[in-house]
Image: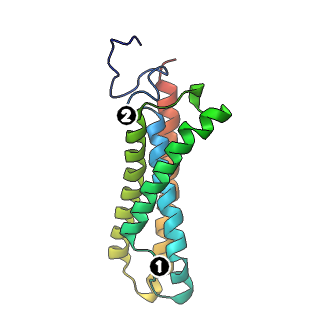
Amino acid sequence: MGSGESTPIVATSTSQTGKSPIDYFSWGHVDLGICSFLLLSLINTLPSYFEDQLIYFIPYWLMLVLVFVVAIVWEILENTLFVKLGIKFEGRRDSFKNAVWDIIFGVIGGLATWIFKGILVNICGTAKNSIPQYIIYFYTVGFVSFIIILACFFIGRAITKD
């Protein structure tokens, strides 16, 4: 792309990847948000399984803030350490616009998982006999969501022109 050309919102070629706000790696950042929230949630609700009542050590709003922090740290690592080690895509840093959108996509993944967990708590309730069922549903759907989003990443990679 020449210096006079504008960057499209959605990358359609690998030369636009990392420059456009949305590229096939955006799916990976959604997955990062899902996985971060699932892991934090597991740490947060594991005692519930043993205590037979819903216990939270970390409030959910703080978990979402932590997902945001994870997304920022990932972007920093991706655009510094990974570039230096030569494991970053095409060995180049993301544009600022792309990095900001990658963080937003990570938060969207965490937020969607948070909303789903809230719906499950309202449906299953917090009674003693519903906690194991709620935990199994939540992590099963979370894992399936991760796989679906990962498939979207591979489809996006396949249809992006070289």
| Residue sitting at x 49%, y 22% | 14
Would residue 116 be found to the left or right of residue 83 on screen?
Answer: left
The residue that label 1 is drawn on is 57
**Towards the viewer: 131 or 60:** 60
Return the x and y of residue 51 as percentages of the image width and height. 53, 89
Give the color scheme: rainbow, by chain, secondary structure or one colour.
rainbow
User: Amino acid type of disc 2?
Assistant: Lys
**Towards the viewer: 115 or 133:** 115
- Which mark is in front, 1 or 2? 2
Q: For residue 97, which numbered disc appears in the image?
A: 2
Return the x and y of residue 41 as percentages of the image width and height. 49, 68
**SS for callout 1:** loop
**Towards the viewer: 134 or 3:** 3
Q: Quadrant of residue 113?
A: bottom left
Q: CA distance from mark 1 to mark 2?
A: 35 Å
Compared to residue 158, the image places residue 131 above or below, namely: below
